[in-house]
Image: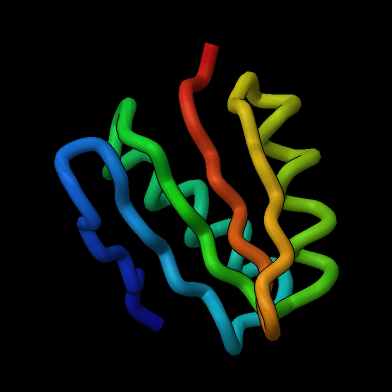
Amino acid sequence: MELKLKKLDDNRYELDVRGNVCPFPQIFTELALKEVGDAILEVITDNPPSARDIPVVFEKKGYRVEKKKEENYWRLIISGSD
């Protein structure tokens, strides 16, 4: 499986993990955050457990996570670890 990471602008990336089930969305999110550094990462998932668990896991690691429900998926906006 490849990391579907797309640069949106200088400080924002998008990671599409739709079609993946736990634990892969969380693993891919971890890898993407290491790659993008201080940039904002938008994770797109259609897996309800991932939409529930990713914010909890990464907030515990010091990130800010905003969760938005779109039509058939969730957009998790992850920024700035403390």
In the rendered image, the residue lying farthest to the front is 71
Judge left or right: residue 81 versus residue 63: left
In the rendered image, the residue lying farthest to the left is 10
Q: Which residue is rendered at x = 31% and y = 52% of the image?
A: 13
Q: Which residue is rendered at x = 74% and y = 26% of the image?
A: 60
Query: Where 81 falls versus 46 (above or below)?
Result: above
What count of labels does the image hold?
0
Q: Quadrant of the N terminus?
A: bottom left
Query: Where 70 falls versus 63 (above or below)?
Result: below
In the rendered image, the residue lying farthest to the bottom is 19
Residue 74 placement (x, y as % from top left): 67, 67
> Quarter of the image holding residue 38?
top left
Viewer-proximal residue among 11 and 15 = 11
Colouring mode (rainbow / by chain / secondary structure / one colour): rainbow
Residue 79 placement (x, y as % from top left): 49, 31
Query: Where 72 falls versus 12 (above or below)?
Result: below
Judge left or right: residue 74 versus residue 3: right
Judge left or right: residue 49 versus residue 47: right
Residue 40 placement (x, y as % from top left): 39, 38
Residue 45 placement (x, y as % from top left): 62, 72
Q: Quadrant of the C terminus?
A: top right
Viewer-proximal residue among 64 and 1 = 64
Query: Where 16 falls versus 29 (above or below)?
Result: below
